Image (spheres, rainbow, N blue to C red):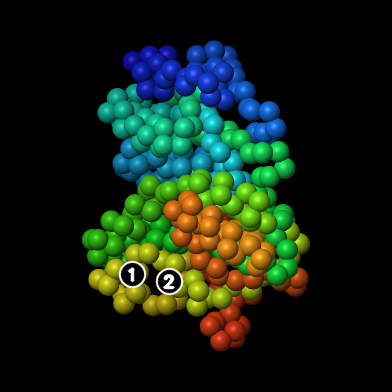
Amino acid sequence: MGEFDLIARYFTRPVRPGGAVALGVGDDCALLAPAPGMQLAVSCDMLVEGRHFFADVDPEALGHKALAVNLSDLAACGARPLAFTLALALPRVDEPWLQAFAGGLLRLADAHDCELIGGDTTAGPLNICITVFGEVPAGQALLRSGARAGDDIYVSGTLGDARLALDALQGLHPLAAPALARARQRLERPTPRVALGMALRGVASSALDVSDGLLGDLGHVLRASGVGACIDLSKTIDLIAASTYPESAACQFDANYLQQCILAGGDDYELAFTAAPARRAAVEAAARASGTPVTRIGVVQDQPGLRLVDAQGRAVQRRYASFDHFA
Ligand code: ADP
Ligand code: MG
């Protein structure tokens, strides 16, 4: 099968009429027609074999994750997904693999009305690069720079399960089958918090998605906003979902390891955001409306830096580093 047959068979579908996509796959450019008063939100993420996923990963899950990590960036801006492009380097044409990969990719795309409008396909070491386009009312995007002293700090969903699964799959520790299955879902099929991000427009003062680890990613918000923060560790320990399985983590691991997974695990794709205390009811309403639990874990402060405290407010030494490709 040649390059153009491959694109036609797996990555070309009719464009939905009446949407923001005026022209999809097949020409030199796709055409997007954002509605008046909207800004285009654009983000790009690359997944590299051996770096972001194992060579033998389920291709259906890989297709899902490649788009999910990009939708997560739109969610962090409060943008509604419109479309995406797919640049793909493939070592060979493996039709069952392509079928499964495209299935996982396009099912998530359909769930978010996000259309595949173009891309590039070449032979080479397996590499997947997606660019997503979303829309957000002009001036309403959630930015990293909007946190103010006194704001509450929240995180959505659960944290740390992806790291727990990764460590188990790499043989660092055993994990009982049900807990591994659940944690592995979070590693391989993350849920982009798109509905929550959109519901937080006009409510959150800042937001970002947690991809490299909570503390490191929060640091980006604090620096961009010129503020500091204090995190109450007693509010974060319940954030790990797999540990609620009695046969697994809570009793199996020491609290330090679980804290490390939660605070610096990476690959979570939850939203961390800030909001003024006066907006607590609005935050809860956004969480309910989007079906996404949120947990308040700390407070923004004038003093720069990130401080950790226990339930009694006593300082706790920070020894968790987030992921950095070049560190
Ligand atoms: P060009 O010659 O301009 O590089 P290509 O021949 O690479 O264009 O691609 C032909 C058409 O197929 C273009 O519309 C391009 O956007 C689309 N395309 C190529 N690869 C993919 C892919 N993996 N997924 C979706 N569309 C693709
Ligand atoms: Mg090309």
Quadrant hosting residue 298? bottom right
Whether residues under marks 2 and 1 lie with C-beta atoms below 8 angstroms apart, the answer is yes
Residue bearing the label numbered 1: 244
Quadrant hosting residue 275? bottom right
Residue bearing the label numbered 2: 238
Specify which label sits upstream in the sequence, 2 or 1. Answer: 2
202 is higher (above) or lower (below) than 19: below
Where residue 196 appears, as percent x and y from the top left, is 52, 51
The answer to whether the beta carbon of the residue marked 2 is less than 8 Å from any atom of ligand 1 is: no
Residue located at (53% from left, 57% from top): 285
Structural crowding at the residue carrying mark 2, measured as other residues with C-alpha within 10 Å and reported as few (<14), some (14–19) or many (≥20):
some
Where residue 2 appears, as percent x and y from the top left, is 38, 14
Q: Amino acid at mark 1?
A: Thr
Structural crowding at the residue carrying mark 1, measured as other residues with C-alpha within 10 Å and reported as few (<14), some (14–19) or many (≥20):
some
Judging depth in this view, the residue of 79 and 260 nearest the camera is 79
The answer to whether the beta carbon of the residue marked 1 is less than 8 Å from any atom of ligand 1 is: no
Q: Is residue 172 visible?
A: no
Residue located at (52% from left, 41% from top): 70
Residue located at (50% from left, 74% from top): 235
Residue located at (53% from left, 83% from top): 311
Separation (CA) of disc 2 from disc 1 = 8 Å
Where residue 288 appears, as percent x and y from the top left, is 47, 56
Q: Quadrant of the C terminus?
A: bottom right
Q: Secondary structure at mark 1?
A: helix
